[in-house]
Amino acid sequence: MAEVCVIGAGSSGIAACQVLQARGIDFDCYEVGSEIGGNWRYLNDNGMSSAYRSLHINTSTRQMQYASFPMPAELPAYPDHFQIARYFDDFVDHFGLRDKIAFRTEVTSVVPEDGVYDVTIRERDGVERTLRYRSVIVANGHHWDPRVPEFPGEFTGERQHSHYYKTFEPYVGKRVVVLGIGNSACDIAVELSRVADKTFMAMRRSAHVLPKFLFGIPTDHLTTSPLARGPLWLQRLSLRAMLALTRGDVTRYGLPKPDHKVLAAHPTVSDDILTRVGHGDVTVKPNIARFDGDAVVFADGSREEVDAVIYCTGYRITFPFLADGLFNAADNEVALYHRVVPVGRPGLYFLGLVQPLGAIMPLAEAQAHWIADLIEGTAALPPPAEMNREIHRYRERMRRRYVASKRHTIEVDFQEYLADLKRLHRMLPSSKLTGTGS
């Protein structure tokens, strides 16, 4: 019986592979696609990538890189997805992980059995096999099962989730509604505003839009600055002041006034959307109320004839391969001790199932080290009651801090959460946490 099954060879899965190999822990990694990189592999044949042709990261290289494998210094502050995919390829090849990954191999079921897990895989030739593992690390990502809202009425135009948006060509000369105010919505609306006949951006609520650079420095460097270690009120006050100095009030550009404080929602990062709105190239609308043939009727009663609607409405957290009752993610609520371990499921771990104010990759790498500690037995979990109390405290903090939304159920603060993981490692050599000893 093998020791560990790693599901997925995206940015989190390969981090798990590197840590497990460095610790000498036997593992198998299964990837349904033919290449590594997951969401960052454009046109990934695993069907799960939401990357579009013009996509650039919105967390800078310094924040995104693995501690065990820094990004090349010659990369720009915000690389595109092709450069990120090459970085992941280089990571896998540097650590000699490629031969440990079974490509074109889908995990179809994970069933607990006598304290271990029976994992059924479907190989590239269609043959299914069931193998037994002591531990399973779920690292297949949470940006692949689109959440599509329902509105009354019939629409004769095209409706599509942003997950399937790849290039602007299908929308040249058309009238398009982009629904949402997150990062994908802003990117797509900006891109379409240059080629579409008319671009509308509809939203339930507005947002505080952060630039990619503040005073010539990548904005997300603030997440590791001394400022980020201060109380939340000070972080908000400081960021609000910096935004006022550099961008001013978003209402002056044409966005509605946000109904929440700075840092009370996942950041919307864009250098272009306010300018496009201010130029009139993107027309802002309230939420969609209903469809009416070839038209969209908005919540303010206005009506626009359009050819297409693109839903930038996030994703459902689902794990179709997990046996019924093994784990519940209803309404995107997940109960995980320190965002990794389900209560009462020894040997089952979730890697990268977080939405940070910052980048996932360094956090997934740190999570992987803690998981390796638990597998090795150099760390142990507390009693279930204590685990449940930590989960409850986390949920209450999130409810107090963030606006109510399915996108905030797995939110973490980069600095605070990394500090939590360091506390879990506090009895271990620092090289095991940072990966510098690998």
Image (cartoon, grey):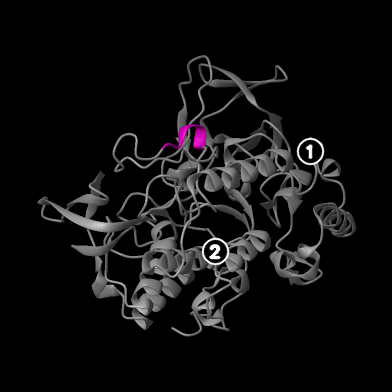
Instruction: Identify which amino acid the numbered label 2 is placed on.
Output: Leu
Tell me the crowding category of disc 2: few under 14, some 14 to 19, or many 20 or more residues within 10 angstroms, Cα based. Answer: many
Majority secondary structure of magenta residues: helix
Expressed as whole percent of the image width and height from the top left, the position of residue 150 reads 50, 23
* Secondary structure at numbered mark 1: loop
> Separation of disc 1 and disc 2 at Cα?
29 Å
- Left of 18 or right of it: where is 219? right
Q: Earlier in the sequence, mark 1 or mark 2?
A: 1
- Left of 222 or right of it: where is 348? left
Instruction: Identify which amino acid the numbered label 1 is placed on.
Output: Pro
Nearest to the observer: residue 150 or residue 302: 150
Q: Considering only vertical position in the picture, is 429 above or below 396?
A: below
Span shown in magenta:
328-332
Q: Quadrant of the N terminus?
A: bottom left
Residue 89 appears in the rendering: no
Q: Which residue is mark 2?
A: 363
Residue 100's tag is: none
Which residue occupies 57% across, 48% down?
184
Residue 258's tag is: 1
Expressed as whole percent of the image width and height from the top left, the position of residue 287 reads 65, 27
